[in-house]
Amino acid sequence: MNYQKVVLFTGDTETLAYFSRRLAEYFSSLKKQVFLFDFEEELESFLKLTWFIEKGNTVVITFNFIGFCGEDIFIEKNGKLLWDNLEIPCLNIVVDHPFYYHKFQPLLPKKYIQFSIDRDHENYLKRFFKEIVSGGFLPLAGTEYYCLEEEKITIVSANGKKYPYDYGRKSQWIPYKERSMDIIFTGNYTTTESLKPHLKEVNEEYAAFYFRIIEDFLKNPSLKIEEGIEKHLWKEVEKITEEGIKTCMPHMIFVDLYVRFAFRAKAVQTLVDAGFRVNVFGGGWENLQCNHPENLILHGMLDSSECLEKICDSKISLNVMPWFKDGAHDRVFNSMLNHAVCLTDTSKYLKEILEDGKNVVFYELNDWNGLIKKVDYLLTHEREAEQIAASGQKYAKKFHTWKNRGKILDKYIQNRL
């Protein structure tokens, strides 16, 4: 397809809008005309959109079904989607497990392609939704803070020292040894107790069933989410079928959220109680139960760009994967691109592309003493840690930016559509 126009979305979920703006920068660099539909100015955006889109010359790129969720504004008087009336290809990058979004399947445009950020998610799509065209595996990417096009930036370390960046010149990173934060975690926290009210509509027997699955994950964190759930469905639900598995999966979102936040809490709590100061940027961390709260440095909510700025002033950026066992999270590549040591649990994909101790440091979710030892080693061997950070930045800049992902999408559009 020889296209010249790209539609992306903003004004909905902050993180996804941020990803969309990064892709918008890339497609603009290709001299494509890019339209960012802003949900905060929905009516005005829609009027402009109707003048912008052009049959045979436009593609839509979105995340997590934004634009395909049954939004009234995109449904025309004939009851059809705007995208269908103009036969516009719609590419959707799904950044959560597909079982979160079964309900949107009947609402999808006719020329719809779905990309998965985890190879297990792609397999799930091909297994249960054969009618949906898969665009393949497209892992999330990271952003180098100094490369943002939105504004000229000055990094300010927590100690007050300024590190300006002039476009067209080499980035002046805060030197590793001068970074003010030893450990950072960027992301929200929800207590597992606060998730339990989501079970109020199920009886005690079903609740016990959910917690048996959760307990299995807590003991066996290498289990894939669908693997662990399916294991219990086959074992405990009489005469369960393949279609029955598909029907049950969306009801397991509680399990996924419970497990991911339990391990997120455990990783941070382990380091805090071991005597390390952990700077957390995100909501809910004031509710973390730990023995040494004085080591938990609360900074509150930040947007995506502000989180990158803080990583630039950190030595170690901690990541806990949201149960992507064959994919990556943007925290991994954001950490690497901004010269922090990425300290993350593993996935099959990450083990394939990264080298432990060279451009990343891996830990295991069932080895908390090992996590403590790795952090202690990195903080007492700064020269080696700095080399890992530098190597990670060089590698991620070559392979894992949104420019890299944009190239893949552009190639797909030109060769497959």
Image (cartoon, grey):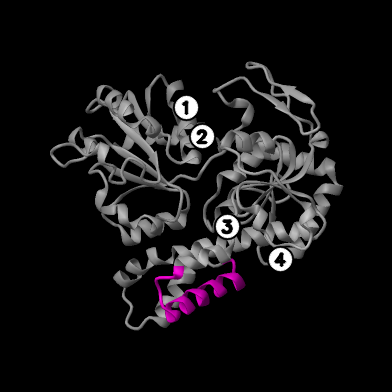
Q: Which mark identifies residue 402?
A: 2
- The local secondary structure at tag 4 comes to loop
Q: Nearer the viewer, residue 399 or 368?
A: 368
Quarter assignment of residue 149? top right
- The local secondary structure at tag 3 comes to loop
- To which residue does mark 4 refer? 367
Mark 4 is surrounded, within 10 Å at the Cα level, by few (under 14), some (14 to 19) or many (20 or more) other residues, namely: few
CA gap, disc 1 and disc 3:
34 Å
Mark 2 is surrounded, within 10 Å at the Cα level, by few (under 14), some (14 to 19) or many (20 or more) other residues, namely: many
- Number of on-image labels: 4
- To which residue does mark 1 refer? 26
Of marks 2 and 4, which one's residue comes earlier in the chain?
Answer: 4
Relative side of 177 to 333, left or right: right
Q: Residue at x 46, y 44 (%)?
A: 138
**Position of residue 154 measured from the top left corner of the image (x, y, whole percent):** 69, 23
Mark nearer the viewer, 3 or 2? 3
Quarter assignment of residue 32? top left
Examine the structure image and report whether residue 275 is included in the region drawn in magenta. no
Of marks 4 and 1, which one's residue comes earlier in the chain?
Answer: 1
Of marks 3 and 2, which one's residue comes earlier in the chain?
Answer: 3
**Position of residue 328 measured from the top left corner of the image (x, y, whole percent):** 55, 49
- The local secondary structure at tag 1 comes to helix
Q: Amino acid at mark 2?
A: Trp
Q: Residue at x 18, y 36 (%)?
A: 76
| Residue extent of the magenta highlight | 199-222
